[in-house]
């Protein structure tokens, strides 16, 4: 059913965030041989999961007590996520990692404007809503959206190779008197336009990855922000609190923030002698920020 009240969305990577605490004392007490082997196996797996076009993996040292390590998996399929999870669980490294939290979602591009335009186009063509021709032509228009030059690269962009990451889940409010889902379509579209306008004023400073999690996890969306300067998270999230889509309708879960590092820096992170570094992705495979 193509309900004109419901905005369409396009989906890309399946995404799994996993947060672990890491027992540094136990790690430090392990023999060097065991540590070297554990690092090597884990780094090899992460390099393997990063390679090619079928997924990606991001590692971050979380700052604060909620976790020490965040692993972000991207996969083409839900099954791919399940498999990535299993592969990590089988690592020796898991002897010193305790799962603290996780979040399952799928990368999503919301299409408020485009959905309204597609419905209008089909009306102009004189098609009866939800008739077989309507459905076929609607699907064709959606395919065009998904394949468009603007959208396609964003659905399967690699994890932004920026030093700092901030992740939190959120809902749109469904209260008795304040209810996002009870607003007329045009009003929600207007609020999202305003939201996008404010967001775009941070263009270049931050890369956002929005993923939908209705049906998979406890909130409705996951929000990942990536930046070269951690102060940008505070400025952006604060400014957004004044924007109606957030001030009136946003409800937030826990926040995690940290520093990203590359798989070849895993040993540096685990040994804790220095801050691990992040190697830049090639321009071609990373999310567009300009
Ligand atoms: O995808 C796009 O860039 C198009 C415009 C856009 C959409 C559709 C956009 C732009 N966002 C969209 C959807 Mn967003 N966003 C958040 C948060 O902390 C808060 O108050 C809210 C958390 C931030 C910080 C943020 C930043 N966005 C969404 C949705 C789905 C809602 C729906 O479909 O109903 C959520 C939950 C959400 C939340 N947003 C931007 C940003 C930024 C920085 C941009 C501009 C991106 C750019 O062009 O560089």
Image: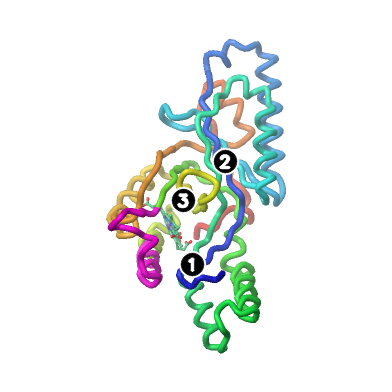
Can you tell me whether the CB of the residue at mark 2 lies under 8 Å from the nearest atom of ligand 1? no
Numbered badge on residue 7: 1
Can you tell me whether the CB of the residue at mark 3 lies under 8 Å from the nearest atom of ligand 1? yes
Can you tell me whether the CB of the residue at mark 1 lies under 8 Å from the nearest atom of ligand 1? yes
Tell me if residue 177 is in the magenta stretch: yes
Residue at mark 3? 220
Q: CA distance from mark 1 to mark 2?
A: 27 Å
Place of residue 36 in the rendered image (x, y in percent of width and height, measured from the top left): 68, 20
Q: Quadrant of residue 66?
A: top left
Residue 244 shown left or right of residue 5 in the figure: left
Numbered badge on residue 258: none
Q: Is label 3 in a helix, a strand or a loop? A: loop
Residue 68 shown left or right of residue 198 in the figure: right
- Label 1 neighbourhood size at 10 Å, few (<14), some (14-19), many (20+)? some
First in residue order: circle 3 vs circle 1: 1
Name the residue nearer the viewer: 16 or 124. 124
Q: What colouring does the structure picture have?
A: rainbow
Place of residue 67 in the rendered image (x, y in percent of width and height, measured from the top left): 47, 29
Q: Nearer the viewer, mark 1 or mark 2?
A: 1
Asked whether residue 241 appears in the rendered view, the answer is yes
First in residue order: circle 1 vs circle 2: 1
Q: CA distance from mark 3 to mark 1?
A: 15 Å
The residues colored magenta run 172-195
Name the residue nearer the viewer: 81 or 7. 7
Residue appearing at x 30%, y 60% in the figure: 244
Place of residue 198 in the rendered image (x, y in percent of width and height, measured from the top left): 35, 61
Residue appearing at x 59%, y 53% in the figure: 286
Residue at mark 2? 72
- Label 3 neighbourhood size at 10 Å, few (<14), some (14-19), many (20+)? some
């Amino acid at each position: 059913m193509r309900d004109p009240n419901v905005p369409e969305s396009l989906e890309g990577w399946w995404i799994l965030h996993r947060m672990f605490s890491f027992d540094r004392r136990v790690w430090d007490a392990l023999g060097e041989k065991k540590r070297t082997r554990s690092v090597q196996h884990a780094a090899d797996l992460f390099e393997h999961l990063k390679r090619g076009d079928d997924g990606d993996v991001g590692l971050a040292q979380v700052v604060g007590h909620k976790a020490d390590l965040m692993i972000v998996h991207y996969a083409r399929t839900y099954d791919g996520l399940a498999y990535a999870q299993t592969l990590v669980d089988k690592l020796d490294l898991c002897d010193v990692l305790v799962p603290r939290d996780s979040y399952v979602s799928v990368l999503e591009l919301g299409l408020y404007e485009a959905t309204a335009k597609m419905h209008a186009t089909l009306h102009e063509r004189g098609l009866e809503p939800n008739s077989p021709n309507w459905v076929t032509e609607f699907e064709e228009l959606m395919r065009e959206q998904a394949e468009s030059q603007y959208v396609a690269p964003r659905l399967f962009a690699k994890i932004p190779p920026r030093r700092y990451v901030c992740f939190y889940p959120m809902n749109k409010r469904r209260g008795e008197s304040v209810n996002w889902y009870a607003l007329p379509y045009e009003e929600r579209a207007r609020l999202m336009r305003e939201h996008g306008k404010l967001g775009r004023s941070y263009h270049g400073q931050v890369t956002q990855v929005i993923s939908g999690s209705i049906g998979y996890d406890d909130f409705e969306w996951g929000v990942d922000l990536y930046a070269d300067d951690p102060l940008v998270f505070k400025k952006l999230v604060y400014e957004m609190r004044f924007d109606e889509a957030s001030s009136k309708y946003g409800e937030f879960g826990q926040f995690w923030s940290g520093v990203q590092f590359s798989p070849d820096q895993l040993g540096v992170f685990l040994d804790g002698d220095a801050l691990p570094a992040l190697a830049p992705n090639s321009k071609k495979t990373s999310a567009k920020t300009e």
